[in-house]
Image (cartoon, rainbow, N blue to C red):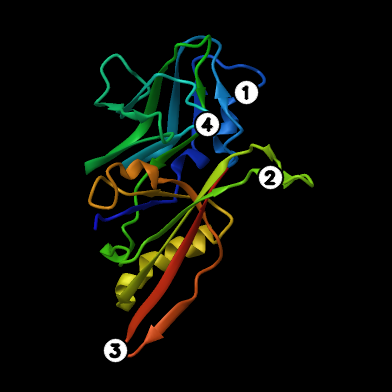
Amino acid sequence: MANQYFLYDNLIKSATLTPSTVSAQYPASNLVDDRRSKVYRSTANSANIVIDLGSAKDLDSFCIVHNGTSFGITSITLEFNSSDSWASPAVSQAITLDTTHGIGYHIFNTTQTYRYARIVLASSLAYCEVSKIFLGKYASIGELTFEYPIKYKQNNNSTVTKNRLGQRFIDLINTQKEISGSISTMTKEELAPLLTMLDYTSFTLPIWLIFPQGNITTDNDRISGYYYLKDDPTLNFVVGNYWNTELSFEEGK
């Protein structure tokens, strides 16, 4: 089974965001609103957003999801630099967008340390639209992974009613993913990063759950995504001085 990455300490939340152009109805401040329907829009089909982290920060993870319908961009490039100057950035990384599953991400092999980041956008529309993005470091919880089995479900939120003849009347809405798995035999040292994540997020802040390509499905982007914990998990201290728990996630909308 492939390892997974937990992304939760999103540096976008405390950064200064400066877009090249902005629609007054869709400001860049929408990027720090956790609702996926709150989006940033430019006023042209090419744009960029400079991200000032305030000081040099360690970075190894970037992720983007769309607003639930489709991406409002056709391409996105992530850049890093030590100064707000972009003629020749120190790092330039194209992000692959999975338009089928509405996600794009990149995990760097080594940690990058920079104060400034920039996302460069292009679109086939009259504007560029971005919903939610993550920039920061992933948390590999105790260097552990989910055990077998992983449980996955796609909940259709549509409403179905029937008349007296049994005919169906369907109000189509959306589909919401759920995923859960167990992590067992954690030492107290391995438990510590999990507790840090739970202290930070509880079930009220999003967690980006990334499954790199592995042996789970033919395309793990299907189960990767933008989630919330369904509840605060129970932690069980068992014989051998180990900790066990189950984490249950529901897709954020």
Q: Distance between the residues labelled 3 and 1?
A: 54 Å
Viewer-nearest of discs 2 and 3:
2
- Residue 75 percent across, percent down from the top left: 37, 20
- Residue 39 percent across, percent down from the top left: 58, 28
Mark 1 secondary-structure assignment: loop
Q: How far apart are marks 2 and 1 (CA)?
A: 30 Å
Earlier-in-chain disc, 4 versus 3: 4
Q: Distance between the residues labelled 4 and 3?
A: 45 Å
Residue under numbered circle 2: 159
Residue under numbered circle 4: 131
Q: Distance between the residues labelled 1 and 4?
A: 10 Å
Mark 4 secondary-structure assignment: loop
Earlier-in-chain disc, 1 versus 4: 1
Q: Which mark is residue 10?
A: none
Q: At x 56% / y 11%, what residue is drawn? A: 43
Q: Residue furthest bottom?
A: 239
Q: Which mark is residue 26?
A: 1
Give, as a three-letter code, the residue at label 3.
Gly
Earlier-in-chain disc, 2 versus 3: 2
Determine whether, in the image, residue 237 is placed left or right of residue 1. Answer: right
Structural crowding at the residue carrying mark 3, measured as other residues with C-alpha within 10 Å and reported as few (<14), some (14–19) or many (≥20): few
* Closer to us: 98 or 75: 98
Q: Determine contact: label 1, label 4, CB under 8 Å.
A: no
- Residue 9 percent across, percent down from the top left: 44, 50
Q: Residue 240 carries which label?
A: 3
* Closer to us: 7 or 11: 7
**In the image, residue 199 above or below residue 107:** below
